[in-house]
Image (spheres, grey):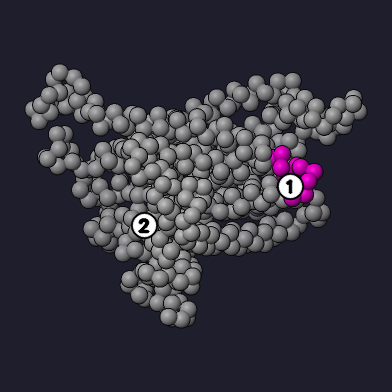
Amino acid sequence: MFEFCTDPKTLEGLTWLTCYVTTPKHMNLLWSVFVVFGLLAAVIPPILMLGFAGALARQSKIAPVRMLGLGYTSLVRGVPDIVLFLFFPIFLDQMIEILRHLMICPGDGRAFYQGNEFSVCTEAKMPLGSSAQWVHQTWGFVLAVCAFAFVFGAFTANTLYGALQAVPQPQLETARAFGMTDRQTFWRIQMPQMWIYALPGLSNLWMILLKATPLLFLLGVRDVVYWARELGSMKTQAYEYAHPDWRVYYFGGLLVFYLALTWGSQKVFDRLQARVGRGQATIGATA
Amino acid sequence: MSCAQTLADYGLRAFGYGERLLPKGDITLCEQIVLIGSGMLWNVYFGLLAVIFGFIFATAIAVARVTGPFWLRWPSELFVFLFRGSPLFIQFFFAYALFSSLPRTGVEINLGLFTLAPHTSWLTKAWLGATIVLFLNTSAYSAEIFTGALRSVPKGDVEAADAFGLSGWSRFRRVLWPTTLRLAWPSYSNEAIFLFHATALIFFSGFPAWRQQGDGLYYANYFAEQTFNPFVSYPIVAGFFILYSLFILMFFGAVSKRLNRHIASPVGRPRLRPLTILGR
């Protein structure tokens, strides 16, 4: 990157370090930080959508819909999230490939699970075997986003359901007495007031989501953990920048990174809580 | 091969007893259940050790945070912040890197009678290294719960204890601690469940499985990779975890009953709400 970095073997001390951390490989580590933020940005909309869908399903008047909502939230909460993270992407991948197989090559009447193999016709592979490397990586990322959304959607549904139930019943009764329809009551009375009850739970979930982002590594995405392992492992003299096993420092750096993230988030949520609490008759808002 | 034979071969495979080679080729349902169940013994081991020692340490930290002198209070705060603020997944990686770098950097831990060499290598094995991380992690989370509970012990209880002439250790043992436990119990049971769930992370983070001796999820993942069929092994391991969660809830429910036995009406008793918060 810099002029004086052309021959790393001759460098010493601080210049060596400067050159070392600005190699193209280290830029990958910086980029992977954006992968973490990209994941957070990408999962929030589907999480909130699934959360609302789940919460509304649980307070639905139709029994099967209610059971579906309850089943979804209970199942996800009873099983370790890591099991779901490992299971869900394969599940989704195979389901999509089977669907594509049925659409693209319907004449091919093969069994999908033959002994120890899963097979669909080559045109139905997702992504196609001929696709570029980045397509495969993006597809992996999309599957990861779906897995996160599925797991955290259930937790969000639970929080939002609790918050919707916590809105005082007389408020809703008053709305009905004023002649509001169910829809109007929900949008104008129940929704705006639920946030103060939902926020502590949501902030807790946000913290958990932040701390779950390194699990991307398990899904084969090249995230911060991947690059920390890659860059930190011992480099012999065959490499341009030789160094012993520095994984401790790299993982220590990651710990500090996450501590800063959670600490900053806590500050933001404290302010937000004070804001949504304005004018509400709760202990937190009045005290 | 009959299922009884499989049980004999693989029942303790996760601890290195029985058949050395893992099943290959045509994998039966029985083999999957037995081997995953054998791996789940590791989850029980990690979970139990971390919960038992974590409970004691967390109580000490909570007391230090609420009533301790300044020089005890701030390290406790820092400890809780460090372990609650960072992902357990990275803590495992960090600990493994740290433990495996110990002999090379020449850090010596003198434990009196014991020699050093085996100790540092044990730390890089999951049975000790991962247990230590898990213990510290659950201590921090439980300490947060206990601190909250200790701070909300009713003033009247403390005044009554003073009036009875109780002080120091006996006041803590007979008045403060039981009430703290009673208040903390619903949240603490959640923490215990999520600690058991977190044990599934161990062999997927820093700590490698030694001679393919892994936990339940490790074997479930092995089968899923062997058969390309995730619809058998993952539901099995999920089923085991749900079963465990129910056991934990039953145990904690029984303890809760005992803690609340002097409280007359069922109204106002802290109810055991299963799984209302998620772990880490």
The local secondary structure at tag 2 comes to helix
Chain letter of the residue beneath label 1 in the structure image? A
At 43% from the left and 64% from the top, the residue drawn is: A114
Q: Is residue B91 above or below residue B263?
A: above
Would residue A20 be found to the left or right of residue B33 on screen?
A: left
| Residue nearest the viewer, comparing B155 with A271 | A271
Query: What stretch of residues is rendered in magenta?
Result: A55-66
Drawn side of residue A215 relative to residue A176, left or right = left
Residue A122 placement, left or right of A200? left
Q: Residue furthest top?
A: A3
Query: Which residue carries the number 1 mark?
Result: A66
Report crowding for label 1: few under 14, some 14 to 19, many 20 or more residues within 10 A (C-alpha): some
Q: Percent from the top left, x then y, of residue A136?
A: 37, 40
Badge 1 amino acid: Arg
Residue A253 drawn at (x, y percent): 34, 34
Binning the other alpha carbons within 10 Å of mark 2 as few (below 14), some (14 to 19) or many (20 upward) gives many
Q: Is residue B245 visible?
A: yes
Magenta-span inclusion, residue A35: no
